[in-house]
Amino acid sequence: MRVSKRKHLGTGAVAVASALALTACGGVETSTGAGDGQGEYPSGTVEMYVGASAGGSSDLISRAISKGLSDDLGASFPVINREGANGALAAAEVASAKADGSVISVQNASLFVITPLAVAADQVTSIDDFDVVGGVSRDDYVLVTNSDNDWSSIADLKGAGKKITYGTTGVGTGAQLSCALTYEVGEIDAEAVPFDGGAPALTALLGNQVDTACLQVGEAIENIESGKLTALSVFSPERIDYLPEVPTAAEQGLDVEVYQYRFMTVPKGTPEDVQETILEGMKATFETEEYQKFNAQNSLTPMELSGDEMLAQLEEDKQRYADLVEEYGIELGSAS
Amino acid sequence: MDVNAFLDGFSLVTQPQNLLYCLIGVLVGMLIGVLPGLGPAATIAILLPITYSIDPVSAIIMLAGIYYGAQYGGTITSVLLRLPGEASSVVTVFDGFALAKQGKAGTALGIAAIGSFVGATVSIIGLTLLAPVVAGFALDFGPPEYAALALLGVLLVATIGSGHMLKALVAAAIGLLLATVGRDSFTGAERFTFGNLQLTDGIDFVVVAMGLFGVGEILYNLEQRHGKPHVPAEVGNVWPSRADIRQSSGAIGRGSVIGFVLGVLPGGGAVMSSLAAYATEKRISKNPERFGRGAIEGVAAPETANNAAATSSFIPLLTIGIPANASMAMLFGALLILGINPGPQLVEERPDVFWGVINSMYIGNLILLILSIPLVGLFVRILRVRPAILAPITALITILGVYTINNSTFDIFVMIVFGVIGYLMKKTGFEPGPLVLAFVLGSIVEASTRRSLIIFDGDPTGFFTRPISGTILVLFILVALTPLARKLLRRPAHGSAPTHDRHDADATV
């Protein structure tokens, strides 16, 4: 009963989506025609696994890409939420799927470069099980404090003369790493308070239950703009467009560069031409005004690199984080 | 409050197009609410692409309708099939299912619909007038307050149902233990996962509830049916009588207030409110032993409270930009996609969205009440279906429901394991309710206590020196000690009536 209804709703949604595609972006259709040597892909439904529940930024990004791909490639790309273990369960589904492009997934860098620092070795997801098709976008972290505190920079925290508490969004996340590194590198006496995701951490900060928190920009930006929170630092290489007033950690003399980014993956060994088609579809999606608006609304910075560039970035960040954690003796989790 | 903007919101909502989207939203919500598993969050996600093409205000009115419509539908399976689809409707099962067995399913569902309507409407009025004030209250609730509140909840759990106090405590203790399964959220250490990645995030509430209640009941009935010939359940009085309504009116009034206040708290507010409303009714009732055996107030109170809570959970989203639960997180995402920023500035930047959504809820709830009248009559006929046919259908619903939560076949097997446990519990006189509720509250107690201790730098006196958590803990001690103190005081006074003693033991809350 439920399944048929769900399917029905799904097809309804697809019907509307494709109707939209026909009316709104007729110009994109030409790219579907470039089919020589590409076989039939996509011939049927393509499942897009997400390692998070519906509603979070990982889910919304996958849904935006899913819509773009189905508009451009014509097939249906249903998003399947498989939450758990920081995304490792969804990753396992994709890794064990048939390598023909029928199962794809936009995955988070943190699963491959940060989570391994916090969990047991046999629970680490390796990037070697996947082919990386291309980059999607970067999601930055920001160090924020309640505006009731008269702090405006990381240096002010050091001068606060007390132990600073900081909320994080959980163990093995970039939010935890960025905050932990900041306080360790800056030699500030601090204590982590892990919360179960961004919303509870934000609530605790607004209620002055913790002194500071590291959050994703999209989670905090509304309260920064309304003046309830003060942003102390971002952790990107350069200042970010959405918070141009906020200095980077590097500008404040701390070598802390941490960010989340997402990229399209397929099971290892998926044919080149299939990967090529998916990449074309992604590029077409990136071009649409609708997708660009989506990025801006969610404070995401495009990171539309090639698969090889993406892979190199992942390897580099993995090494860099591991070195930093070792150098400063930071423990993200006791099981590492 | 800006009265002009409020009235503008009403004229916006009464436009035919918006009325239509409101109707679609609550209807879809009610239908998905009937079946456990596929919740409002997943439904909103599926319908999201449709909203690109319609006006943002209409879209949000529709998506919000799905959310509160689902709260109405959730009661139906709890009462008729003993399948609570959400933590906040577990409490309804005790008296709702007992009433259904007595042929009063219609009464239970009717009262639940009326209570839901009143609770939601009271909550919307509160939302209209008090949103900013109450939002501040939510922020005063830090980890210590959650720890104290959830601890009080665990104590209330023990008094729920009709069984033995001791057996309820044992079940609750097992529930607390089950809550520890999963990767520790503070250190990353594995706890009772046996190295299985599937268990790293713990066990899902719906999986446990479906197994213990739904599958357990099916197995138990299978055995029973071999013993005696089937007598089709009598389905009498489809709509509650005036006497039923009079009897429930107090419970509905108190449930509305409890639900509105606790619903504002993100994370666990709705569960706590249904639990607190039920416990309050049992506590003030003249004959508390009726509870768990088909007391109509036992349905009215939690159903009113969880609907009021569902409505007031919009307050943190619309005023401070914090999603209070998974469905609110999905609405948060939907608002962003539609180009609206949910947060402190929403009421000034987009008064049309703010007041449009709030005012649409007045109308949406009215539609839901009207829809309930024919649907209750339709749904109670399920009980006339022979168990030999109903049991496999129920089994199918639970399996599909559990699968759709996280697209996981592993969860189906976990549910079956819990089904066998539920069967054994029923045979030995243990109730699953305390286990399930303690399971939900257990992770809140643990995580909040540890968070608090980090914030207090290890000093546990902090729990008592903060005003709100201190008050809750004093209440906790009072509730825990009252029956004991009463017994001690009464014993010296020459042997009082034994019946009174029994009442007191039952009415521990």
Image: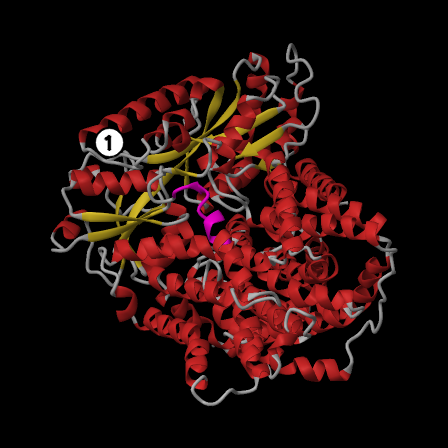
Q: Answer with left or right where residue A86 lies relative to residue B102.
A: left
| Residue A113 visible | yes
Q: Which residues are magenta?
A: B175-184
Residue A336 at what x, y percent from top left?
31, 31
- For disc 1, the marked residue is A325
> Which residue shows up at 86% across the image and 53% down it?
B386
Q: Position of residue B214 (x, y in %)?
A: 69, 51
Q: Confirm whether the magenta stretch covers residue B479.
A: no
Identify the amino acid type marked 1: Val
Q: Which chain letter matches label 1?
A: A
Q: Position of residue B418 (x, y in %)?
A: 61, 45
Asked which quadrant contains residue B151, the reply is: bottom left
Residue at the (48%, 68%) spot, across then down: B262
Measured as percent of width and height from the top left, residue B289 is found at 62, 75
Viewer-side residue, B219 vs A32: B219
In the figure, B27 relative to A158: above or below?
Answer: below
Q: Is residue B228 above or below residue B488?
A: above
Residue that lies at the very extreme toward the front in this rendered image: B494
Dot 1 alpha-carbon crowd within 10 angstroms: few under 14, some 14 to 19, many 20 or more = some
What SS does tag 1 mark?
helix
Q: Nearer the viewer, residue B411 or B63?
A: B411
